[in-house]
Amino acid sequence: MTTIAAILPPMLTSAIAEGFTAPEVLESGKALMPKANTLGEGLAMILQDVIPLIRPDLYEASRVCLAVIAAVMITSVVQSFSGTQKTVCDIAGTASVAATLLFSTNSMIRLGSDTIVEMVQYGKLLIPVMTAALAAQGAVGTSAALYAATMGIISLIGSVLSKLLLPMIYLFLALAVASGATGQDMLKKFRNLMRDGISWFLKTVLTVFTTYMGLTGIITGTTDTAAAKVAKAAITSVVPVVGGILSDASESVLASVAMAKNAVGLYGFFAILAIFLDPFIKIGCHFLLLKATGAMCAVFGSKAMTELIGDFSTAMGLLLAMTGSVCLLLLISTVCFLRGVS
Amino acid sequence: MEGLRQYVVSVTTAAIICGMLTATLNKGAVQSLVKLLCGFFLAFTFLSPIGRLNLKILPEDFGLDYEEASDAAQEGERFARNSIAQIIKEQTEAYILDKAAEQGLSLEAEVFVSGDEIPIPKSVRLTGQASELERGRMEIILEKDLGIAKENQIWTG
């Protein structure tokens, strides 16, 4: 910035910085937002702030898991004395495990949903700034194509996740509870179909998006490079003194805009991570501890209850996949804008 | 989207009802019959809405909106162009003042830049005292070095 300031008038330097300012991180991400100038430094600061969050999240998740273990133990004891009433015990046990886990699962799903909404909201503020900055560098075609793809996908995935896939987690759990209570294979198959459907959708969207973003740079980059060559030729056709001034001015503005774009992109990168990480850790702790609980309960609990606990863990896994997908989409998009046209 | 969600909910509900129903019956002819009926019911629930399913899963504001994208890109292009035009204006003015000083003139210069894609100095307003000869010399310099035609050089004062 010092070099640029020496070339550009001070007012213009600040005008470029003001013209391309990253939108402020949302409230939920402020706690983890690092004040760093480089990627490595920022990631290290985020990591330092995130690690202390793990312990309270683990405590919260482990309280839930202890309640589940208690429910499974009690059910096992009753089952061993129940004689011919095993079916009733199975249903009661399944219902007790489901009731124990439902409240925490519901709050995790709501947390996941809010995180997705916030990331999408932030993305819609960040992408136009990155687009303008990249276009100011001369990559007009590339910036428009990246903008269209990113905003389109963000709108789509935000809508599909909140209106379809997140409710499908509840349906997945309903099928899991029903199959746990009844032992019906058909319900297990429907449950698996739902899980596989959600996974397939997320993988497809990510694959299509990353492929498109990768190809866009190659295709539109050719057009932008050709346009830049035409502009350069036009400059050299102008009278020498003006041509020299024009050339210097263009380079100065390009360099300044590039720096502003990089600063905006870096801030946006950190902001997306800051919004994403805390909920990710909360849901991740629930996911891991439920997996461990399922493994422990396999020792003394019935197969149905162990599977049900595994299904709740899978639900947390699906939630992680959904929030992680949105975060990854936005990060990939930000990197594509930062990379621009080579 | 709402239609698709209702479809998924109805299939799931039907599956749960069938599962619970068959689980409550003891093995035998009745259970077999109920299973068969549940199969038909599930198949009907699964397949019949497909024909009239509204596959409008895309949100209202979805679209690879190239117009909006183009507007955003043009905003950046405009900003860069205006920044370059500002630099050209200021540096051209500085150049004119240097040349005027070489001629022993004390002038004020205001350069107007073209609105083309590549901004170049188009006209200039010069304020200050100068004889006809001195003006003539400046006009030649401005035309030759900066490409500003004589008719676009406005002298005041």
Image (cartoon, grey):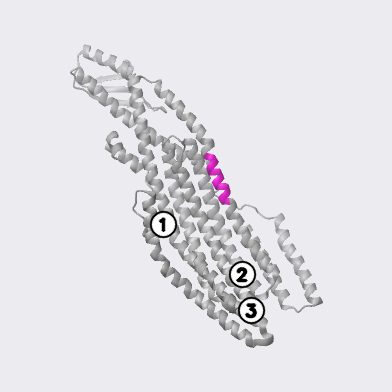
Alpha carbon distance from label 3 to label 1: 42 Å
The image position of residue B38, as x and y in percent, is: 75, 69
The amino acid beneath tag 3 is: Ile
In the displayed orientation, state which residue is furthest to the top.
B133
Q: Which residue is disc 2 drawn over? A: A174
The amino acid beneath tag 2 is: Ala
The amino acid beneath tag 1 is: Ala
Dot in front, 3 or 2? 3
Q: Which residue is disc 1 drawn over? A: A274
Is residue B60 positioned above or below B32 on the image?
Answer: above
- Marks 3 and 1, the one that precedes in the sequence: 3
Q: Secondary structure at mark 1?
A: helix
In the displayed orientation, state which residue is furthest to the right.
B29
Task: Provide the chain ID for the residue under circle 3.
Answer: A
Q: Which residues are magenta?
A: A205-216
Same chain for marks 3 and 2?
A: yes
- Marks 3 and 2, the one that precedes in the sequence: 3
Whether residue A211 is in magenta: the answer is: yes
Q: Which residue is disc 3 drawn over? A: A91
